[in-house]
Image: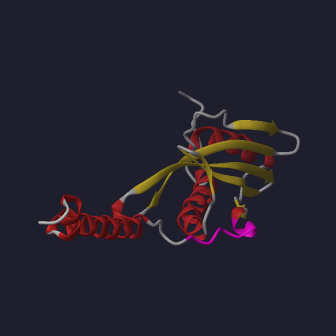
Amino acid sequence: MGRPGRALREGPSRRIPGRMLLLVILLAVGASAGCQSTPEQEPARQEDLFVREVSEVPGFSKEELFEGAKMWVASRFSSDLDVIQYANRDLGTVVGRTSFPYARPRKWGQTERFDFRFTVTVETKDERIRTTFSEMALVGFHGYDVITKEDMEALQPRLTEAIEDLASSFQRAPRQDDW
């Protein structure tokens, strides 16, 4: 018969742990390959994180545009933050700090949810408004995240729509003071 310890090494039971080890290694390699994050996305360029546009608003004075811009900034963006940070009638300037929700798509149909925070500055002159979006940041569950080129491609239309909304708010019928 031989030594009892030797029979265990030579028998089929010795091969099972080797196969198990190989199976565990293959599963670990496969799982790590599947869990790799998506390739790093290119960060947005600094100049893309600053949006400025001048809108013509014929027939409205600096004061009328200032008051309308102040109301627009306060009501356009839903936020828990204090929206209007600064308003100066003489300069015709309104500065607000606000945010709106943004969802970034991820692989397998999942999304990452963020608050897209920014500063909006509206400067008024007779018949013109200059709107600027700056100091942009994505704030998620785990803190700040980099704004990517793809993020700005998705966010830019929303900012442009907001600028158009401000300008068009003055095109609507004048408010009736008799109520």
Answer with the quarter of the image where residue 79 lies.
top right
Q: Residue furthest front?
A: 2
Residue 67 point in image, percent of width and height = 72, 40
Q: Is residue 26 left or right of 48 when viewed as pictured? A: left
- The quarter of the picture where residue 53 lies is bottom right
Foreground of the two, 17 or 139: 17
In the rendered view, would you say 82 is above or below 174? above
147 falls in the magenta region:
no
Instruction: Tell me how many marks there are.
Output: 0
Q: The magenta stretch spans which residues?
A: 40-48
Point 66% across, 37% down: residue: 83
Give the residue at x 30% y 65%. Answer: 21
**Residue shown at the point (80%, 54%) measured from the top left:** 126
Image point (75%, 69%), residue name: 47
> Can you give x and y, in whole percent of width and height, for residue 162 in the image?
59, 55
The secondary structure that dominates the magenta segment is loop
Residue 72: x %, y % from top left = 63, 43
Instruction: Tell whether position 44 is magenta.
Output: yes
Is residue 13 found left or right of 54 in the rendered image? left
